[in-house]
Amino acid sequence: MAACPSPPMSPPANPTDEDELDFTREPAAPAPARTPAQAAEARAEAKTGTPQLEKSGFYVSIARRSPLMVPPRNGEKDSLLVVEDDPDLAQLVIDIFMTAGFEMHWASNKTEINQQMNRRPGVDLVLMDIVLPDANGLEVLQRIRMHPKLAKLPVIMMTGRSSAEDVAAGLVAGADGYVSKPFQMSGLVKAVQQVLGLK
């Protein structure tokens, strides 16, 4: 098994202050709250989706399916960022998606998330764990949603938390999909394909 792709040791290509994300600092302003209607819709979606999650090993909201294919930012192939602190699981996910033709990147903490999110060209989708050694994946998702250029970046939560309340929290925070651990790899690949509008 090949080693996980390591994050770059220095920040890439001079992003402007407006572009740069820094998850090691507190945000200047709180994330915009979802409207009560959006929150209610996410909770209802989580309630109906959780039995599917338990039965099939993954959960993807049909409402989050992209109607059009999302073009790769690098112009060649879709690039995914796996945010996961378990290197064995990260490697497994990376191997599966590389075999499926994706370009892969990996981050396991705030510093590495900073380095990967500030790469140019950016990633096309993030697979986000919730429990990280120095961060909460839902808070990282909220920071992404606050950023003017990354607000629409597809994010799928990839986590061991699978109750209806957990799924609702992820969807309310702006996740495009929610996949539980342990998951079927075919389900995770299908989730990514749906969110990117590939199939």
Image (cartoon, grey):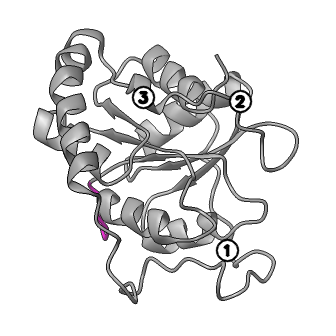
Badge 2 is on which residue? 69
Disc nearest the viewer among 2 and 3: 3
Secondary structure type for disc 3 = helix
Q: Name the spot of residue 72 as percent of width and height, x first.
A: 77, 42
Q: Which residue is mark 3?
A: 63
Most frequent secondary structure within the magenta stretch: loop
Q: Amino acid at mark 2?
A: Met
The segment highlighted magenta reads: 131-136
The disc placed on residue 9 is 1
Judge from the rendering whether residue 8 lies leftward or rightward of residue 154; answer left or right: right
Tell us which disc is closer to us: 1 or 3: 3
Please tell me whether residue 152 is drawn above or below residue 117 in the rendered image.
Answer: above
Q: Position of residue 63 (x, y in %)?
A: 42, 28
Q: Amino acid at mark 1?
A: Met
Quadrant the C terminus occupies: top right
Please provide percent x and percent y for residue 191: 48, 25
Dot 1: within a 10 Å radius of its alpha carbon, few (fewer than 14), some, or many (20 or more) residues? few
- Dot 3 amino acid type: Ala
Residue 160 in view of the camera: no
Please give the name of the residue rendered at 38% of the width and 17% of the height, measured from the top-left corner: 184
